[in-house]
Image: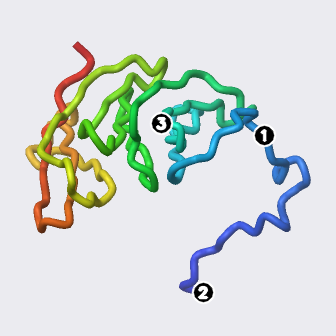
Amino acid sequence: MSDTPAAPDAADAPAADRAATDSGTAATFAGPPVIAHGLVYAGTADARLLALNATTGQERWHSVGSTLTPGYAPVVAGDVVYLLHAELGILAFAAADGAPRWLFEGETRGELLAPLTLAPNPTGDPDADILYLGSDRGILRAIQAPALNE
């Protein structure tokens, strides 16, 4: 048995499994998408966060910002989507409908920021997630994400 993990080959997949779907959004995407809850979440160059049905490509909802940070993927944890915003900090939206949930206004202006990373709280509390954000100033921030299901 080989130690090399098997990777699916799209060329070997049935034609129905290889079909692409055009979302019809006419958007230029500003970073990689994330898939969760049957939706594809992606930031766009025109400052929208889109939630598209992962099967049909139809838009479920979008949220408008002023300057989403290009090149960064959203982070999904439970029923919340977090997104790095070039001017405001970290935005949180309800995953189901895009309703604004939270804003972290840290001192991040003028910094080159690493992508957001979400990790479970080291205390083991499953409802207390921590967002990690690095910068070009040699700072790694650990930001407690508030309980948003209240």
In the picture, residue 22 is in which quadrant? Answer: top right
In the picture, residue 123 is in which quadrant? Answer: top left
Nearest to the eye among marks 3 and 2: give it.
Answer: 3
Quote the CA–CA distance across marks 3 and 1.
20 Å
Q: Are marks 2 and 1 in contact (CB under 8 Å)?
A: no
* Front residue of this view, candidates 58 and 45: 45
Q: What amino acid is found at the position of numbered circle 3 in the picture?
A: Ala
User: Quick one: quadrant of the N terminus?
Assistant: bottom right
Question: Which secondary structure lies at badge 3?
Answer: loop
Question: Which residue appears farthest toward the bottom when viewing the image?
Answer: 2
The residue to which callout 1 is attached is: 22
Could you tell me residue 140's position as x and y percent?
Answer: 13, 59
Nearest to the eye among marks 2 and 1: give it.
Answer: 1
Q: What amino acid is found at the position of numbered circle 2 in the picture?
A: Ser
| Residue at figure coordinates x 44%, y 51% from the top left | 70
| Residue at figure coordinates x 50%, y 33% from the top left | 48
Residue density around tag 1, few if under 14, some if 14–19, many if 20 or more, within 10 Å:
few
Question: Which residue appears farthest toward the right when viewing the image?
Answer: 15
The residue to which callout 2 is attached is: 2
Question: Which secondary structure lies at badge 2?
Answer: loop
> What is the image's colouring?
rainbow
Looking at the image, is 61 positioned above or below residue 14? above
* N-terminal-most mark, 2 or 1: 2
Residue density around tag 2, few if under 14, some if 14–19, many if 20 or more, within 10 Å:
few
Question: Which secondary structure lies at badge 1?
Answer: loop
Residue density around tag 3, few if under 14, some if 14–19, many if 20 or more, within 10 Å:
many
Position of residue 22 in the picture relative to residue 108 (left or right): right
Q: Which mark is residue 47?
A: 3
Could you tell me residue 54's position as x and y percent?
Answer: 66, 36
